[in-house]
């Protein structure tokens, strides 16, 4: 049965049409949101006098029964169900009888789907924000642990100046803080209810979209019905936000890959967050970091694909918009998994601070300090820059140690040689926001304050260990009688009887951000783990997933 069979008489849909237009395989993930939307719609119909109290009660009870069947994975799809919305309405009618035919009064699937997807996106972006905050907490904890450890800072992948390890880690933390801001801004803009817009022009029935919007927890209702059913800006914005989160995770992952190589040797991976090789016994691979790097391309593709879909659509609703859901669902899943995995990798990794210091203590990394020292003596900077550059070139060409040339130079001498001593250059970074001990100590406190504020606005409460967070009970819930309440967790869709529910990437894997029994959560050290800078960390035993690809 379709919702539009009257226009087509008794003709049957072709199998080709059914296969090509199928959305049930993915839009069933909106089941919870569809039931939430329908509850508010039923209450609105009752309030407007279009349903009696008894009829509304019957429909609400049927919706609760459907919700229970979905939760218990006993819901069975019928062959004629076009999508999750049709399936739920069909089942409600089976339970409620003839009154089920009143459920869709004053509503089109156009405004229904748009409302469902906004509810999903609001909730999902909240969960992604919490995942970012958990990773930021890990970065903050590791920055505090790092103390006065330092490493080379790079430009153009060339050693440039020494920076504190804490400064380097928090550079990623601040980028993620901007991601949190973007998610909050996108949630604010999408917080508009389309319900009541109908197919495109509203309705002659006495609906109250403002009341239903409040019931669903939206801040306002639509102002233009055509825009309401065709707008997918919020999906594009969400995909951009998620793509940029993925880009930041890719950059972080790239550094973890580099740092864990023998060529760098700055970082040692915990066994629980690394993989091996099927052929090469010595290998320990940073697969999490590599996949975080790779998935950024996938996320960018989702964004560009949707924008290409949207660019040529006339007003108002077109079936093209069915293509908004799969990229959004996948982007949310991939980002949540990437955040959790990267948090675990960084929380359990061991930094080899001695290797970092050796790399940073090369005399040429203090070249800028020599130039600034000359500036403090009264020499114009451009002249000082040229002088020091010539000394460095002379050192390379003649293979004479730089300290010897500095000591012998009439403009430099013994006092300048002291600037080349290990640990001295990084201690001279005193400007606000800089990489030295003073500015970094202030930065850590400011970052911690920003993190606390973001945790509060995203409804996060700190758990028992570093980096452990959970949704604050009752936070960010709206509406009454269950309408529009935010359900924390935006993982894969609920199960249905007769429908296989795929694992995220294969059997044996945990849900995003969910620790296995006995496993330390991201940011929480396993018992017996060593402090940063020591040669190794004790690894907790964790169940594995399917064999990874690789060598």
Image (cartoon, helix red, strand yellow):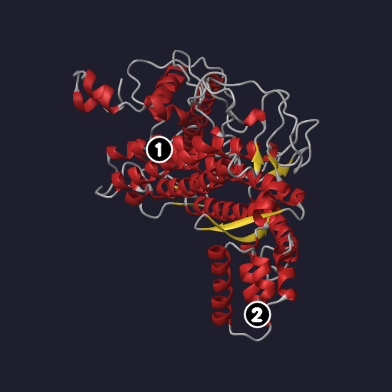
Residue at 41%, 25% in the rendered image: 89
Q: CA distance from mark 1 to mark 2?
A: 56 Å
Name the spot of residue 12 as percent of width and height, x first.
21, 18
Q: Is residue 323 above or below residue 162?
A: above
Name the spot of residue 349 as percent of width and height, x first.
68, 38
Q: Which residue is denoted by mark 1 in the rendering?
A: 327
Check residue 489 in the rendering and tell me which mark sits there, or answer none. Answer: none
Q: Which residue is denoted by mark 2 in the rendering?
A: 374
Q: Nearer the viewer, residue 354 or 229?
A: 354
Q: How many marks?
A: 2
Q: Secondary structure at mark 1?
A: helix
Name the spot of residue 57 as percent of width and height, x first.
53, 28
Q: Nearer the viewer, residue 407 or 510?
A: 407
Decide: few, some or many residues near mark 2? Use Cα within 10 Å; few <14, some 14-19, many ≥20.
many
Q: Is residue 191 above or below residue 36?
A: below
Q: Quadrant of residue 175?
A: bottom right
Is 490 positioned to the left or the right of 527 in the image?
left
From the image, state whether disc 1 or disc 2 is nearer to you.
2
Q: Quadrant of residue 460?
A: top right
Name the spot of residue 505 as percent of width and height, x first.
49, 25
Q: Secondary structure at mark 2?
A: helix
In the rendered image, the quadrant that contains the N terminus is top left
């Amino acid at each position: 049965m379709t919702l539009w069979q009257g226009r087509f008489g008794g003709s049957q849909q072709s199998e080709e049409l059914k296969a090509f237009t199928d959305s049930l395989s993915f839009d069933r993930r909106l089941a919870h949101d569809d039931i939430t939307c329908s509850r508010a719609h039923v209450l609105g119909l009752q309030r407007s006098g279009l349903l009696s109290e008894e009829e509304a009660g019957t429909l609400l009870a049927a919706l609760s029964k459907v919700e229970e069947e979905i939760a218990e994975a006993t819901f069975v799809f019928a062959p004629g169900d076009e999508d999750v919305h049709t399936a739920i309405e069909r089942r409600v009618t089976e339970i409620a009888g003839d009154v089920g035919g009143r459920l869709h009064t004053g509503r089109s699937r156009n405004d229904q789907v748009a409302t469902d997807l906004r509810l999903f996106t609001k909730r999902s972006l909240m969960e992604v924000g919490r995942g970012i905050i958990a990773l930021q907490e890990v970065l903050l904890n590791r920055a505090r642990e790092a103390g006065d450890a330092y490493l080379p800072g790079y430009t153009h992948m060339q050693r440039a100046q020494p920076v504190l390890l804490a400064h380097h880690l928090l550079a990623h933390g601040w980028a993620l803080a901007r991601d949190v801001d973007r998610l909050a801004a996108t949630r604010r803009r999408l917080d508009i209810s389309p319900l009541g817009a109908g197919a495109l022009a509203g309705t002659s029935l006495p609906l109250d979209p403002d009341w239903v919007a409040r019931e669903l927890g939206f801040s306002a209702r639509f102002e233009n019905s055509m825009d309401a059913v065709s707008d997918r800006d919020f999906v594009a914005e969400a995909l951009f936000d998620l793509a940029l989160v993925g880009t930041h995770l890719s950059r972080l992952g790239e550094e973890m890959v580099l740092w864990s190589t023998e060529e760098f040797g700055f970082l040692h991976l915990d066994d629980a967050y690394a993989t091996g090789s099927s052929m090469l016994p010595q290998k320990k691979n940073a697969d999490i970091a590599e996949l975080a790097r790779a998935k950024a391309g996938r996320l960018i593709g989702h964004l560009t694909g949707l924008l290409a879909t949207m660019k040529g659509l006339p007003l108002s609703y077109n079936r093209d918009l069915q293509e908004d859901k799969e990229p959004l669902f996948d982007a949310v899943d991939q980002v949540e998994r990437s955040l959790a995995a990267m948090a675990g990798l960084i929380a359990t990794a061991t930094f080899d601070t001695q290797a970092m210091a050796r790399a940073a203590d090369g005399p040429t990394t203090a070249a800028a300090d020599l130039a600034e020292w000359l500036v403090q003596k009264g020499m114009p900077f451009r002249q000082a820059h040229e002088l020091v550059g010539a000394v460095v070139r002379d050192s390379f060409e003649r293979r004479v140690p730089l300290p010897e040339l500095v000591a012998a130079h009439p403009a430099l001498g013994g006092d300048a040689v002291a600037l080349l001593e290990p640990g001295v250059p990084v201690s001279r970074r005193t400007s606000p926001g800089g990489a030295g001990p003073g500015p970094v100590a202030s930065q850590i406190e400011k970052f911690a304050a920003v993190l606390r504020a973001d945790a509060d606005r995203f409804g996060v409460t700190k758990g028992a260990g570093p980096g452990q967070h959970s949704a604050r009970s009752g936070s960010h819930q709206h509406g009454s009688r269950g309408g529009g309440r935010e359900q924390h967790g935006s993982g894969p869709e609920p199960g249905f009887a007769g429908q296989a529910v795929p694992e995220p990437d294969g059997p044996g894997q945990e849900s995003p951000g969910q620790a296995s029994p006995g496993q330390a959560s991201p940011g929480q050290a396993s018992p017996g783990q060593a402090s940063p800078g020591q040669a190794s960390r004790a690894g907790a035993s964790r169940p594995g997933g399917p064999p990874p690809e690789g060598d």
